[in-house]
Image (tube, helix red, strand yellow):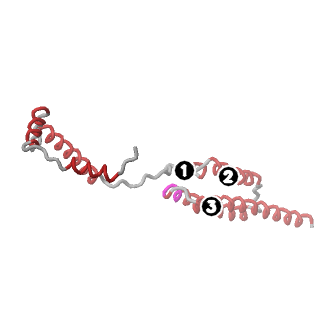
């Protein structure tokens, strides 16, 4: 079993040096052509290839045309422009607005108007009317620019100022009535 590799390689070289008969290769190729004939492919485009190319070209052209000719759309505002009050922005702000407006109206309803305190009362009512006008301007701003923290804070601050003004009016009227009462007694 153990053979010398050199001897095996020498025998292999002798076998490789054997030459084929002349014309063997051409006979082999002729035989191969007869058994497996090669179909010749046309070098031009067929009708279907041309039609497919035209369809693809038209599709790409139409897509590019619509892409480049669509107008640039402005960003859509998500803000509801039909805001009328602070309560239309959110339910929590509606609660705040309702609380302040109810408190203001309650305190105003408790005020007793007399001929002696009418002048004081009228001065406070004028100031309340100014704050109401300012509140309306802030609501217009809210409707125009949409809800933002600055406008919302200003609206709430306006409600606080109006409530504080009514509370001061009530305190002043109590002081005024106490002073008037002491003058009558004394």
Q: Give the labeled residue for mark 2.
A: 96
Q: Give the labeled residue for mark 1.
A: 84
Residue lying at the far top of the rendered structure: 35
> Residue sitting at 17 percent across and 44 percent down?
53
Left or right, residue 21 beside residue 8: left
Q: Is residue 40 visible?
A: no
Is the residue 12 above or below the residue 173 in the image?
A: above
Is residue 36 part of the magenta span, yes or no? Answer: no
Q: Position of residue 161 (x, y in %)?
A: 68, 62
Question: Distance from label 2 to label 1 (Cα)?
Answer: 15 Å
Under circle 3, the secondary element is: helix
- Front residue of this view, candidates 101 and 151: 151
Question: Distance from label 3 to label 1 (Cα)?
Answer: 16 Å
Callout 3 touching callout 2 (CB < 8 Å): no
Q: Position of residue 141 (x, y in %)?
A: 52, 59
Q: Give the labeled residue for mark 3.
A: 153
Under circle 1, the secondary element is: loop
Which comes sooner in the sequence, label 2 or label 1? Answer: 1
Left or right, residue 150 beside residue 7: right
Q: Which residues are magenta?
A: 140-144
């Amino acid at each position: 079993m153990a053979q010398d590799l050199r001897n095996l390689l020498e025998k292999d070289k002798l076998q490789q040096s054997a030459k084929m008969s002349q014309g063997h290769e051409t006979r082999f190729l002729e035989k191969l052509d007869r058994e497996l004939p090669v179909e010749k492919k046309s070098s031009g485009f067929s009708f279907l290839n041309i039609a497919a190319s035209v369809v693809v070209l038209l599709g790409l052209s139409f897509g590019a045309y619509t892409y480049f000719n669509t107008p640039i759309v402005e960003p859509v505002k998500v803000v509801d422009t039909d805001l009328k009050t602070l309560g239309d922005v959110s339910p929590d702000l509606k609660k705040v607005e309702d609380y302040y407006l109810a408190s203001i109206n309650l305190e105003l309803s408790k005020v007793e108007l007399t001929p002696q305190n009418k002048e004081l009362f009228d001065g406070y009512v004028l100031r309340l009317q100014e704050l109401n006008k300012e509140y309306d301007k802030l609501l217009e701003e809210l409707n125009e620019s949409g809800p933002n923290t600055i406008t919302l804070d200003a609206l709430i601050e306006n409600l606080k100022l109006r409530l504080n003004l009514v509370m001061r009016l009530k305190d002043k009227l109590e002081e005024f009535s106490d002073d008037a009462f002491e003058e009558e007694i004394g």
